[in-house]
């Protein structure tokens, strides 16, 4: 199961020679579908493979 979850991330990274240190807009758009900022101070990022990650902002 974890292998399937990360397969979308790996596919997006497969075209890069090395991992970027700085923000890469093209890579961001390949991995992130949308982000939601909640009124309780959280942000939820929805990735194109269906995984959602929440964080305090």
Image (spheres, rainbow, N blue to C red):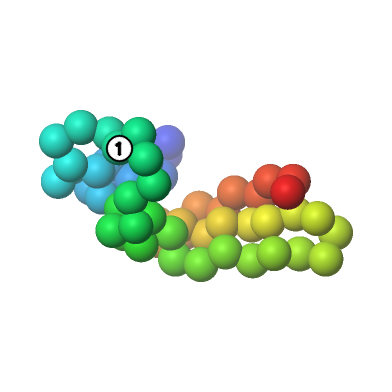
Could you classify mark 1 by the number of other residues whose Cα lies within 10 Å: few (under 14), some (14-19), or many (20 or more)?
few
The image shows residue 25, relative to residue 20, as above or below, that is: below
**Looking at the image, is 53 positioned above or below residue 17?**
below
Instruction: Give the residue displayed 74% in from the left and 46% down from the top.
Output: 56
Instruction: Judge from the rendering whether residue 31 lies leftward or rightward of residue 40; answer left or right.
Output: left
Quarter of the image where one finds residue 3: top left
**Mark 1 lies on residue:** 20
Please tell me how many numbered marks the rendered image carries: 1
Residue at 37 percent across and 40 percent down: it is 22
Q: Position of residue 31 (x, y in %)?
A: 37, 55
The residue positioned 69% from the left and 64% from the top of the image is: 37
Residue 41 visible in the picture: yes
Does 35 appear above or below 24? below
Residue 19: name its quadrant: top left
Extreme-front residue of the structure: 22
**Secondary structure of residue under mark 1:** loop
One can see residue 4 in this view: no
Q: Position of residue 51 (x, y in %)?
A: 50, 53
Q: Look at 43% across and 59% down and name the residue there.
A: 32
Say left or right for 55 vs 10.
right
């Amino acid at each position: 199961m974890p292998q399937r979850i990360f397969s979308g991330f790996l596919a997006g990274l497969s075209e890069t020679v090395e991992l970027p240190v700085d923000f890469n807009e093209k890579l961001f758009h390949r991995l992130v579908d949308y982000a939601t900022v909640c009124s309780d101070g959280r942000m939820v990022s929805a990735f194109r493979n269906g995984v959602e990650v929440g964080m305090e902002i």
